Image (tube, grey):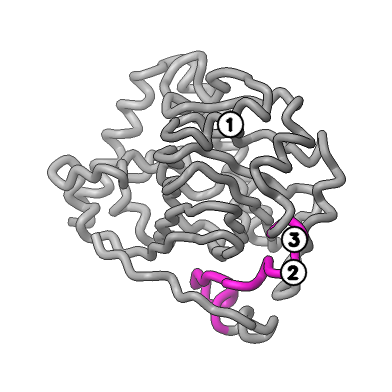
Amino acid sequence: MKLQPIERRSGLTRREFEEEYLKKNKPVVFTDLAAKWPATEKWTFEWLSKNYGHLEVPLYDNNFRKPGKGYLTPTKHMPFGDYLALIQQGPTELRMFLYNIFKHAPELTSDFAMPHVTDGFLKNFPMMFFGGQGAKVDLHYDLDCATVFLTQFQTRKRVILFAPDQGDYLYQHPFTVQSEVKLDRPDFELHPALLKAQGYEVVLEHGETVFMPHLWWHYIYYEDGGFSLSLRRHSTYTRTRGIFNITRHFVVDKGMNYLLGQRWTNIKANMAKKRAMAVL
């Protein structure tokens, strides 16, 4: 497996970004996209806890995708303030996502702006992600196929990206947008095709934004307990592809998982390995 650093740029103009990165589906890190956002200075652990600590939020652990009736359901709920305290104390696998805090605190949307470097942003669907040190987001590409601008706050987050054509090397489970490989502890004997995968890597610092092109695989590791903001962009193609993925996921994958549980996971894993062996 070969990973190269993602290029960092400052002062990118709209034309430069669209010509050099967007049209080429090439990732880049903006060092200053969020520099003038109030959120960059305002959103601290203390401030969020003081103002929104009363919110009851869903939390997920590493069993999020464990087969069975609990598939894709929260592990527990906790007051937001208690969770923020938890992720500052040290390692925990608990993460907060699939919860739109802006529906409960719409005033937060005035603390950031849609990037000026292109059009097509989904203004009604900003999302925030929180995790403790050592928490990870398994390798996948986004179900809705959007392009993503992910801005990190306060602490550090490692992001690893792979282009769409790397899917077979990554042992993609059919009928899903998920990979079975564990990039925090890769097993090249079990997954030999992974050795051929080529991707990109960066450790995002406070205030930096990574552009993740549509359909790109990403793995995220929390170097420290922290949080980020995701702004999403769609085109006609990605919107259509996203509808297909969402339908396939809820009709085929989630339905078969409910009926077969671990047997369905084993079937997908065997299909992924056959595809990977074909490209060795």
Identified at 47% across, 27% down, the residue is 61
Q: Is residue 189 left or right of residue 10?
A: left
Q: Nearer the viewer, residue 266 or 216?
A: 216
Q: Earlier in the sequence, mark 3 or mark 2?
A: 2
Q: Nearer the viewer, residue 160 or 18?
A: 160
Does dot 2 land on a helix, a strand or a loop?
loop
Please name the amino acid that badge 3 sits on: Phe
**Considering the image in quadrants, where does the C terminus appear?**
bottom left
Is disc 2 surrounded by few (<14), some (14 to 19) or many (20+) residues within 10 Å? few
Identified at 53% across, 70% down, the residue is 29
* Dot label at residue 121: 3
Please name the amino acid that badge 1 sits on: Ala
* Dot label at residue 85: 1
Does dot 3 land on a helix, a strand or a loop?
loop
* Mark 2, residue position: 36
Q: CA gap, disc 3 to disc 2?
A: 19 Å
**Start-end of magenta stretch:** 20-40
Up/down of 26 relative to 111, above or below? below
Q: CA gap, disc 3 to disc 1?
A: 32 Å
Q: CA gap, disc 2 to disc 1?
A: 27 Å
Q: Image quadrant of residue 181?
A: top left
Q: Image quadrant of residue 209?
A: bottom right
**Considering the image in quadrants, where does the N terminus appear?**
bottom left
Up/down of 92 relative to 226, above or below? above
Q: Earlier in the sequence, mark 3 or mark 1?
A: 1
